Image (cartoon, rainbow, N blue to C red):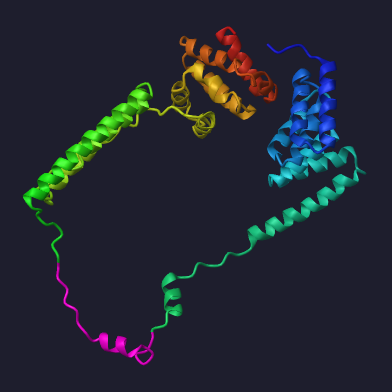
Amino acid sequence: MQNPPNPEKSAEAREAGNAAYKKGKWVEAIGHYTTATVLVPEDPAPLLNRAQAYLKIQKWQDCERDCTKVLSLAGQGRNVKALYRRASARKECRLFDQARSDLEALLKIEPMNTAAKEELTELKKTIKQSEQKSSAPKKAPQDISTLAESTSRKPSAKSLPARERTSSAVKVPITVVPRFTTRPATLAHGAAQGQTRESAELSKNAESSASTNGRSASSAFAASKVTRSAKSSYTSVEAPPSASSGSKSLRSNIVTDAPSDSVVRSPSTGLELVDRLEALAGHDDERWQLLESVPPSRLPTLLGGILEPDHLATIYATLSARYTQARKDDGLVREYMQALRRIPRWQMTESLLLPHERKMGQALCDEVGL
Protein backbone atom coordinates (compact mmCIF):
# COMPACT_ATOMS: atom_id res chain seq x y z
CA MET A 1 0.00 0.00 0.00
CA GLN A 2 1.13 3.51 -0.76
CA ASN A 3 1.81 6.02 1.98
CA PRO A 4 -0.77 8.78 2.54
CA PRO A 5 -0.13 12.04 0.64
CA ASN A 6 2.19 14.55 2.29
CA PRO A 7 1.63 17.97 0.64
CA GLU A 8 4.14 19.82 2.85
CA LYS A 9 7.11 17.56 2.09
CA SER A 10 6.04 17.44 -1.55
CA ALA A 11 6.15 21.24 -1.76
CA GLU A 12 9.63 21.26 -0.18
CA ALA A 13 10.91 18.73 -2.68
CA ARG A 14 9.41 20.70 -5.56
CA GLU A 15 11.09 23.90 -4.40
CA ALA A 16 14.41 22.07 -4.16
CA GLY A 17 13.87 20.86 -7.70
CA ASN A 18 13.15 24.39 -8.91
CA ALA A 19 16.38 25.62 -7.32
CA ALA A 20 18.40 22.88 -9.02
CA TYR A 21 16.66 23.57 -12.34
CA LYS A 22 17.62 27.25 -12.23
CA LYS A 23 21.26 26.22 -11.75
CA GLY A 24 21.08 23.97 -14.80
CA LYS A 25 21.30 20.76 -12.73
CA TRP A 26 18.63 18.92 -14.69
CA VAL A 27 19.22 15.42 -13.31
CA GLU A 28 19.24 16.63 -9.72
CA ALA A 29 16.03 18.53 -10.37
CA ILE A 30 14.41 15.38 -11.77
CA GLY A 31 15.24 13.56 -8.54
CA HIS A 32 13.53 16.21 -6.41
CA TYR A 33 10.48 16.34 -8.68
CA THR A 34 10.22 12.56 -8.49
CA THR A 35 10.17 12.71 -4.68
CA ALA A 36 7.43 15.32 -4.82
CA THR A 37 5.42 13.14 -7.22
CA VAL A 38 5.68 10.10 -4.96
CA LEU A 39 4.50 12.10 -1.94
CA VAL A 40 1.48 13.52 -3.82
CA PRO A 41 0.81 11.44 -6.96
CA GLU A 42 -2.23 13.50 -8.04
CA ASP A 43 -0.40 16.85 -8.07
CA PRO A 44 0.30 17.90 -11.69
CA ALA A 45 2.93 20.54 -10.80
CA PRO A 46 5.95 18.28 -10.10
CA LEU A 47 5.04 16.11 -13.09
CA LEU A 48 5.02 19.13 -15.41
CA ASN A 49 8.30 20.40 -13.96
CA ARG A 50 9.91 17.01 -14.39
CA ALA A 51 8.67 16.83 -17.98
CA GLN A 52 10.38 20.14 -18.69
CA ALA A 53 13.62 18.84 -17.14
CA TYR A 54 13.36 15.71 -19.29
CA LEU A 55 13.19 17.95 -22.35
CA LYS A 56 16.45 19.59 -21.28
CA ILE A 57 18.30 16.24 -21.22
CA GLN A 58 16.50 14.98 -24.37
CA LYS A 59 14.52 12.25 -22.62
CA TRP A 60 11.64 12.59 -25.05
CA GLN A 61 9.70 9.46 -24.13
CA ASP A 62 9.88 10.20 -20.40
CA CYS A 63 8.62 13.71 -21.04
CA GLU A 64 5.73 12.35 -23.10
CA ARG A 65 4.83 9.89 -20.33
CA ASP A 66 4.70 12.60 -17.64
CA CYS A 67 2.58 14.91 -19.80
CA THR A 68 0.19 12.08 -20.65
CA LYS A 69 -0.17 11.30 -16.94
CA VAL A 70 -0.98 14.96 -16.20
CA LEU A 71 -3.63 15.05 -18.92
CA SER A 72 -5.20 11.88 -17.48
CA LEU A 73 -5.63 13.44 -14.02
CA ALA A 74 -9.03 14.73 -13.00
CA GLY A 75 -9.61 18.25 -14.33
CA GLN A 76 -6.28 18.38 -16.23
CA GLY A 77 -7.47 17.30 -19.68
CA ARG A 78 -7.05 20.87 -21.01
CA ASN A 79 -3.69 21.63 -19.38
CA VAL A 80 -1.89 23.89 -21.83
CA LYS A 81 1.62 23.22 -20.50
CA ALA A 82 1.14 19.47 -20.73
CA LEU A 83 -0.11 19.71 -24.32
CA TYR A 84 2.74 21.97 -25.43
CA ARG A 85 5.51 19.94 -23.81
CA ARG A 86 4.08 16.67 -25.05
CA ALA A 87 3.93 18.11 -28.56
CA SER A 88 7.61 19.08 -28.30
CA ALA A 89 8.56 15.57 -27.16
CA ARG A 90 6.48 13.89 -29.85
CA LYS A 91 8.01 16.06 -32.53
CA GLU A 92 11.49 14.90 -31.48
CA CYS A 93 10.23 11.30 -31.56
CA ARG A 94 9.01 11.98 -35.14
CA LEU A 95 5.40 11.43 -34.10
CA PHE A 96 4.40 14.37 -36.25
CA ASP A 97 0.65 13.70 -36.50
CA GLN A 98 0.27 13.30 -32.74
CA ALA A 99 2.35 16.43 -32.09
CA ARG A 100 0.16 18.40 -34.50
CA SER A 101 -2.97 17.13 -32.73
CA ASP A 102 -1.62 18.38 -29.39
CA LEU A 103 -0.83 21.83 -30.78
CA GLU A 104 -4.20 22.14 -32.50
CA ALA A 105 -5.97 21.16 -29.26
CA LEU A 106 -3.89 23.76 -27.40
CA LEU A 107 -4.85 26.51 -29.87
CA LYS A 108 -8.51 25.67 -29.42
CA ILE A 109 -8.06 26.40 -25.72
CA GLU A 110 -5.80 29.45 -26.20
CA PRO A 111 -6.18 30.74 -29.78
CA MET A 112 -3.70 33.58 -29.16
CA ASN A 113 -0.85 31.43 -27.84
CA THR A 114 2.09 32.74 -29.91
CA ALA A 115 4.52 29.96 -28.98
CA ALA A 116 2.06 27.27 -30.03
CA LYS A 117 1.37 29.04 -33.34
CA GLU A 118 5.07 29.26 -34.17
CA GLU A 119 5.65 25.66 -33.16
CA LEU A 120 2.74 24.48 -35.33
CA THR A 121 4.09 26.44 -38.32
CA GLU A 122 7.52 24.85 -37.93
CA LEU A 123 5.95 21.43 -37.49
CA LYS A 124 3.97 21.74 -40.71
CA LYS A 125 7.17 22.62 -42.59
CA THR A 126 8.87 19.58 -41.11
CA ILE A 127 5.96 17.33 -42.09
CA LYS A 128 6.01 18.70 -45.66
CA GLN A 129 9.75 18.10 -45.99
CA SER A 130 9.35 14.57 -44.64
CA GLU A 131 6.57 13.82 -47.14
CA GLN A 132 8.65 15.17 -50.02
CA LYS A 133 11.58 12.95 -49.08
CA SER A 134 9.38 9.87 -48.80
CA SER A 135 7.63 10.55 -52.14
CA ALA A 136 10.84 11.34 -54.08
CA PRO A 137 11.60 8.64 -56.72
CA LYS A 138 14.41 6.37 -55.78
CA LYS A 139 17.27 5.72 -58.16
CA ALA A 140 17.17 2.33 -59.78
CA PRO A 141 20.04 0.09 -58.69
CA GLN A 142 22.78 -0.17 -61.29
CA ASP A 143 23.78 -3.55 -62.62
CA ILE A 144 27.09 -4.54 -61.05
CA SER A 145 28.31 -6.30 -64.16
CA THR A 146 27.62 -3.23 -66.29
CA LEU A 147 29.38 -1.03 -63.76
CA ALA A 148 32.41 -3.33 -63.77
CA GLU A 149 32.61 -3.35 -67.56
CA SER A 150 32.34 0.44 -67.77
CA THR A 151 34.97 1.13 -65.14
CA SER A 152 37.54 -1.57 -65.92
CA ARG A 153 40.20 -0.73 -68.49
CA LYS A 154 42.34 -3.46 -69.93
CA PRO A 155 45.93 -2.28 -70.44
CA SER A 156 47.29 -2.68 -73.94
CA ALA A 157 50.33 -4.81 -74.63
CA LYS A 158 52.40 -1.72 -75.42
CA SER A 159 51.65 -0.16 -72.02
CA LEU A 160 52.97 -3.19 -70.13
CA PRO A 161 56.64 -3.39 -69.11
CA ALA A 162 58.89 -5.50 -71.30
CA ARG A 163 59.29 -8.17 -68.60
CA GLU A 164 55.51 -8.63 -68.24
CA ARG A 165 55.00 -8.74 -72.04
CA THR A 166 57.51 -11.57 -72.36
CA SER A 167 56.38 -13.48 -69.28
CA SER A 168 52.77 -13.58 -70.45
CA ALA A 169 53.72 -16.19 -73.07
CA VAL A 170 55.46 -18.51 -70.57
CA LYS A 171 53.43 -21.58 -69.58
CA VAL A 172 53.84 -22.69 -65.98
CA PRO A 173 53.16 -26.39 -65.31
CA ILE A 174 50.56 -27.08 -62.60
CA THR A 175 50.64 -30.21 -60.46
CA VAL A 176 47.27 -31.41 -59.19
CA VAL A 177 47.55 -32.38 -55.50
CA PRO A 178 45.01 -34.97 -54.20
CA ARG A 179 42.49 -33.54 -51.75
CA PHE A 180 43.24 -36.16 -49.12
CA THR A 181 46.58 -37.74 -48.36
CA THR A 182 47.45 -40.60 -46.07
CA ARG A 183 49.56 -39.45 -43.20
CA PRO A 184 52.36 -41.64 -41.83
CA ALA A 185 51.43 -43.92 -38.98
CA THR A 186 53.81 -42.16 -36.58
CA LEU A 187 52.26 -38.79 -37.34
CA ALA A 188 48.76 -40.19 -36.92
CA HIS A 189 49.72 -41.76 -33.61
CA GLY A 190 51.22 -38.49 -32.35
CA ALA A 191 48.16 -36.53 -33.43
CA ALA A 192 45.90 -39.00 -31.65
CA GLN A 193 47.92 -38.67 -28.44
CA GLY A 194 47.93 -34.88 -28.69
CA GLN A 195 44.17 -34.88 -29.28
CA THR A 196 43.63 -37.16 -26.29
CA ARG A 197 45.64 -34.84 -24.03
CA GLU A 198 43.78 -31.81 -25.38
CA SER A 199 40.42 -33.51 -24.74
CA ALA A 200 41.45 -34.35 -21.17
CA GLU A 201 42.56 -30.77 -20.50
CA LEU A 202 39.34 -29.32 -21.96
CA SER A 203 37.21 -31.67 -19.89
CA LYS A 204 39.22 -30.85 -16.72
CA ASN A 205 38.87 -27.08 -17.31
CA ALA A 206 35.15 -27.41 -17.97
CA GLU A 207 34.62 -29.43 -14.79
CA SER A 208 36.57 -26.96 -12.65
CA SER A 209 34.57 -24.09 -14.16
CA ALA A 210 31.30 -25.88 -13.41
CA SER A 211 32.27 -26.51 -9.76
CA THR A 212 33.34 -22.88 -9.27
CA ASN A 213 29.95 -21.58 -10.41
CA GLY A 214 28.04 -23.80 -8.03
CA ARG A 215 27.45 -26.47 -10.72
CA SER A 216 24.60 -24.47 -12.20
CA ALA A 217 22.66 -25.71 -15.24
CA SER A 218 24.46 -23.40 -17.65
CA SER A 219 27.93 -24.37 -16.34
CA ALA A 220 27.15 -28.08 -16.49
CA PHE A 221 25.89 -27.67 -20.03
CA ALA A 222 29.07 -25.82 -21.01
CA ALA A 223 31.22 -28.57 -19.48
CA SER A 224 29.35 -31.35 -21.27
CA LYS A 225 29.45 -29.41 -24.52
CA VAL A 226 33.25 -29.03 -24.34
CA THR A 227 33.66 -32.71 -23.48
CA ARG A 228 31.44 -33.81 -26.35
CA SER A 229 33.21 -31.55 -28.85
CA ALA A 230 36.62 -32.83 -27.69
CA LYS A 231 35.58 -36.48 -28.04
CA SER A 232 34.01 -36.06 -31.48
CA SER A 233 36.74 -33.87 -32.99
CA TYR A 234 38.45 -36.83 -34.75
CA THR A 235 36.74 -40.10 -35.56
CA SER A 236 39.84 -41.45 -37.35
CA VAL A 237 43.30 -40.05 -37.84
CA GLU A 238 44.50 -42.80 -40.14
CA ALA A 239 42.46 -41.88 -43.22
CA PRO A 240 39.73 -39.40 -44.19
CA PRO A 241 36.09 -40.60 -44.35
CA SER A 242 34.81 -41.77 -47.71
CA ALA A 243 32.11 -39.95 -49.62
CA SER A 244 29.51 -42.69 -49.02
CA SER A 245 29.83 -43.92 -45.43
CA GLY A 246 32.03 -41.23 -43.84
CA SER A 247 29.63 -38.37 -44.52
CA LYS A 248 26.73 -40.30 -42.99
CA SER A 249 28.67 -41.13 -39.82
CA LEU A 250 29.86 -37.54 -39.51
CA ARG A 251 26.34 -36.23 -39.95
CA SER A 252 25.02 -38.65 -37.32
CA ASN A 253 27.69 -37.45 -34.88
CA ILE A 254 26.64 -33.85 -35.42
CA VAL A 255 22.97 -34.62 -34.80
CA THR A 256 23.73 -36.68 -31.70
CA ASP A 257 25.89 -33.94 -30.15
CA ALA A 258 23.51 -31.07 -30.92
CA PRO A 259 22.48 -29.31 -27.68
CA SER A 260 18.81 -29.23 -26.70
CA ASP A 261 16.86 -25.99 -27.15
CA SER A 262 14.51 -26.77 -24.26
CA VAL A 263 16.87 -25.30 -21.65
CA VAL A 264 16.18 -21.61 -21.00
CA ARG A 265 19.36 -19.68 -20.23
CA SER A 266 18.93 -17.54 -17.13
CA PRO A 267 19.67 -13.82 -17.76
CA SER A 268 22.83 -12.53 -16.14
CA THR A 269 21.69 -8.88 -15.80
CA GLY A 270 18.46 -7.05 -15.18
CA LEU A 271 18.58 -5.29 -18.54
CA GLU A 272 18.96 -8.63 -20.30
CA LEU A 273 15.93 -9.96 -18.42
CA VAL A 274 13.58 -7.10 -19.33
CA ASP A 275 14.84 -6.89 -22.93
CA ARG A 276 14.21 -10.60 -23.48
CA LEU A 277 10.79 -10.39 -21.81
CA GLU A 278 9.77 -7.48 -24.07
CA ALA A 279 11.04 -9.35 -27.15
CA LEU A 280 8.71 -12.26 -26.26
CA ALA A 281 5.57 -10.08 -26.31
CA GLY A 282 2.56 -12.22 -27.22
CA HIS A 283 4.26 -15.48 -26.17
CA ASP A 284 3.02 -15.95 -22.61
CA ASP A 285 4.44 -19.43 -22.05
CA GLU A 286 7.94 -18.46 -23.24
CA ARG A 287 7.83 -15.30 -21.14
CA TRP A 288 6.96 -17.29 -18.04
CA GLN A 289 9.72 -19.85 -18.70
CA LEU A 290 12.23 -17.01 -18.98
CA LEU A 291 11.05 -15.30 -15.78
CA GLU A 292 10.93 -18.65 -13.98
CA SER A 293 14.62 -19.18 -14.81
CA VAL A 294 15.36 -16.30 -12.40
CA PRO A 295 14.65 -17.20 -8.74
CA PRO A 296 12.41 -14.63 -6.99
CA SER A 297 15.18 -13.93 -4.48
CA ARG A 298 17.40 -12.60 -7.33
CA LEU A 299 14.92 -10.01 -8.62
CA PRO A 300 15.80 -7.26 -6.09
CA THR A 301 19.49 -7.68 -6.98
CA LEU A 302 18.95 -7.70 -10.75
CA LEU A 303 16.39 -4.87 -10.94
CA GLY A 304 17.26 -2.81 -7.86
CA GLY A 305 19.05 0.00 -9.71
CA ILE A 306 17.34 -0.08 -13.13
CA LEU A 307 13.62 -0.69 -12.53
CA GLU A 308 11.56 1.59 -14.78
CA PRO A 309 7.78 1.80 -15.38
CA ASP A 310 8.02 -0.10 -18.68
CA HIS A 311 9.98 -2.89 -16.99
CA LEU A 312 7.49 -3.22 -14.14
CA ALA A 313 4.53 -3.23 -16.54
CA THR A 314 6.13 -6.03 -18.58
CA ILE A 315 6.70 -8.18 -15.48
CA TYR A 316 3.15 -7.50 -14.26
CA ALA A 317 1.80 -8.65 -17.64
CA THR A 318 3.89 -11.85 -17.48
CA LEU A 319 2.70 -12.69 -13.95
CA SER A 320 -0.91 -11.85 -14.79
CA ALA A 321 -0.90 -14.16 -17.81
CA ARG A 322 0.61 -16.96 -15.70
CA TYR A 323 -1.92 -16.55 -12.91
CA THR A 324 -4.79 -16.55 -15.40
CA GLN A 325 -3.59 -19.83 -16.92
CA ALA A 326 -2.96 -21.62 -13.59
CA ARG A 327 -5.05 -20.13 -10.81
CA LYS A 328 -4.38 -23.03 -8.45
CA ASP A 329 -0.61 -22.64 -8.77
CA ASP A 330 -0.33 -19.09 -7.42
CA GLY A 331 2.48 -19.71 -4.92
CA LEU A 332 5.31 -18.77 -7.29
CA VAL A 333 3.43 -15.72 -8.60
CA ARG A 334 3.06 -14.56 -5.00
CA GLU A 335 6.81 -14.98 -4.40
CA TYR A 336 7.63 -12.86 -7.46
CA MET A 337 5.20 -10.14 -6.35
CA GLN A 338 6.77 -10.12 -2.88
CA ALA A 339 10.24 -9.88 -4.44
CA LEU A 340 9.18 -6.92 -6.58
CA ARG A 341 7.81 -5.10 -3.55
CA ARG A 342 11.20 -5.49 -1.81
CA ILE A 343 12.89 -3.38 -4.51
CA PRO A 344 13.51 0.14 -3.10
CA ARG A 345 12.38 1.77 -6.40
CA TRP A 346 9.16 -0.25 -6.58
CA GLN A 347 6.81 2.23 -4.90
CA MET A 348 8.08 5.19 -6.93
CA THR A 349 8.07 3.19 -10.18
CA GLU A 350 4.54 1.89 -9.65
CA SER A 351 3.27 5.44 -9.11
CA LEU A 352 4.45 6.27 -12.65
CA LEU A 353 2.54 3.42 -14.29
CA LEU A 354 -0.39 4.13 -16.54
CA PRO A 355 -3.80 3.63 -14.87
CA HIS A 356 -4.53 0.24 -16.46
CA GLU A 357 -1.01 -0.99 -15.61
CA ARG A 358 -1.41 0.04 -11.99
CA LYS A 359 -4.81 -1.70 -11.82
CA MET A 360 -3.23 -4.88 -13.18
CA GLY A 361 -0.60 -4.84 -10.40
CA GLN A 362 -3.21 -4.15 -7.71
CA ALA A 363 -5.39 -6.98 -9.04
CA LEU A 364 -2.43 -9.36 -8.83
CA CYS A 365 -1.77 -8.33 -5.21
CA ASP A 366 -5.42 -8.92 -4.33
CA GLU A 367 -5.51 -12.33 -6.03
CA VAL A 368 -2.41 -13.67 -4.27
CA GLY A 369 -3.33 -12.09 -0.93
CA LEU A 370 -0.77 -9.28 -0.60
Quarter holding residue 317:
top right
**Residue at coordinates 81% horizontally, 20% vertically from top-left?**
10
Instruction: Give coordinates of residue 146: x percent, y percent.
Output: 43, 75
Q: In the image, is residue 260 above or below residue 356?
A: below
- Taking the image as shown, residue 245 lies to the left or right of residue 356, namely left
Instruction: Give coordinates of residue 353: x percent, y percent.
Output: 67, 25
Instruction: Give coordinates of residue 331: x percent, y percent.
Output: 48, 10
Q: Quadrant of the C terminus?
A: top right
Magenta region, residue range: 155-176
**Magenta residue check for 282:** no
**Magenta residue check for 175:** yes
- Taking the image as shown, residue 111 lies to the left or right of residue 248, namely right
Among all residues in the image, which is located at the extreme right? 112
**Residue at coordinates 74% horizontally, 20% vertically from top-left?**
38
Most foreground residue, 89 or 202? 202
Most foreground residue, 297 or 253? 297
Residue 188 in view of the camera: yes
Q: In the image, is residue 28 above or below residue 130?
A: above
Magenta segment, prevailing SS (helix, strand or loop): loop
**Residue at coordinates 60% horizontally, 18% vertically from top-left?**
343
- Taking the image as shown, residue 139 lies to the left or right of residue 55, namely left
Instruction: Give coordinates of residue 68: x percent, y percent.
Output: 74, 32
Q: Quadrant of the N terminus?
A: top right
Among all residues in the image, which is located at the extreme left? 185
